[in-house]
Structures are given as structure tokens and as C-alpha cells.
Image (cartoon, coloured by chain):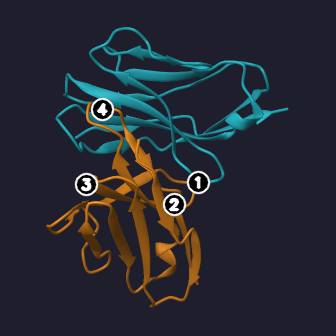
Chain colours: A orange, B cyan
Amino acid sequence: SAVISQKPSRDICQRGTSLTIQCQVDSQVTMMFWYRQQPGQSLTLIATANQGSEATYESGFVIDKFPISRPNLTFSTLTVSNMSPEDSSIYLCSVEVARGGYGYTFGSGTRLTVV
Amino acid sequence: AQTVTQSQPEMSVQEAETVTLSCTYDTSENNYYLFWYKQPPSRQMILVIRQEAYKQQNATENRFSVNFQKAAKSFSLKISDSQLGDTAMYFCAFMKATGANSKLTFGKGITLSVRP
């Protein structure tokens, strides 16, 4: 299955600033998924990033707050814009392991703290 | 829409003992996949086991096995011979079998602590 490199692994940011998280996959994948995991909570899908088109956002998430880039089939970025303490979470990227319901593999996550 | 429910927020088990983690789900789909993921303190999400809904046989992976009850929409995880390294948060997840890149829906998770 694919191996994902995600960075940064953690960051502490000032409110009002932005942070860009990068995910690099070691193989070409059609779609990449971005999740948020708030402290002690489950994973919530933010958006699906498809190469060559705009990302598809889930209810409650908007492009202005979480712009996503997908310049090629192995790379994607998620930006958390105009951050507030409520954005403090773990952010994870994910790709499908293989067709046929084999699940998804995840990056190691970015722990973001906004102060 | 699918929902996944993990009603136990946390559990504790003695090392070498057996523990069962509960999960129920709700869906109108007939064909789907179910998963258990483990998230240790390192934050890495690790796939523990998967079950195909059209298979009646329960999946097993070494010390991990599931009890899949399709009619009851129940999907519990049994961990045998618990080890300290099993200490982690465990998430039950659902995925429709509608082709590639179907979304994962996660339960709230359960924190499992293995005591030495």
C-alpha cells in the first residue's frame, strides 16, 4: 500500500496566521482525503482532493478557510487560514489502499496548536 | 447517511487477557466494508482488520478477530492475549462498496488501556 509523508508533524501558531500542511505519496493516487481530529474526538472528513479539479468540501468546511491544492497525483496541501484556537486539532491526509474496499492509509498527522 | 456508534468511551484490560470492543452501525446499503483502526499515542492510524459485508465468515488477523452480525448491524473487535502495545484509541469505520474512493465514516472511538 501507499506510504504517505506528512509535514510538519506539529506546529504552534499565532491566531490570525495560516499554516500549510503537505502530504507526499510514494505512488500516484486519484484522490486524497483531508481529515480533522479535534482533541479526544473522532476523525471528520474536511474535503476530497482530486487532481486537476477543485476539492470537494464536506458540510461545515469551506474553501476560504481550508484551501487545498492538488498539483499532481502524488502531492497535496491543506492550508488552515486565519487560525483561531478552535482550529487546534490533528490534521491527517489519507489515500485509498487499493480498490476493493481495502480501506485507507493515513499520514502521520499534523498536531496544530493555535495560541 | 451512514452512522457508526461506539458507545463505550474507554476500557481497560489486564495484559494477556481478552477484551471486546463494541461497534454498531446504521445503513440502508447492502454491500459495504467495515474496519477497525488503531491510533496509538504516535497519532498514526493503523488498519487492524477489515470485514466485507457479503462474507458471513468473521475476519481474523492474528490476535484480532471480529464478531460481525449483519442483521443486528453489529461489528465488535476481540483482542486476545492483550499486549501493552495494544494501548491505543480504536475506531470502528464504515465504507460503502460503491466503487473507488468511497468515504470512510468513523465512530467516536474508544480508548483502550492495557495494564501490566
* Badge 3 or badge 2: first in the primary sequence: 3
* Residue kind at label 2, given as amino acid type: Gly
Q: Quadrant of residue A55?
A: bottom left
Gap between marks 4 and 3 measured at Cα:
15 Å
Say if labels 3 and 2 share a chain: yes
Q: How far across and down, in percent of the image, does residue A14 sit? A: 54, 89
At x 51% / y 53%, what residue is drawn?
A41
1 and 2 marks in contact (CB < 8 Å): yes
The residue pinned by badge 4 equals A101
Residue at point 29%, 76% (across, down): A67
Residue B69: percent from left, percent from top: 38, 14
The subunit letter for the residue under badge 2 reads: A
Q: Which residue is mark 3?
A: A31
* Tag 2 residue: A109
How far apart, in angstroms, are the residues tagged by discs 4 and 1? 23 Å
Q: Residue type at mark 3?
A: Met
Marks 4 and 1 belong to one chain: no
Label 4 vs 2, first from the N-terminus: 4
Measured Cα–Cα span from mark 3 to mark 2: 18 Å
Residue under circle 1? B43
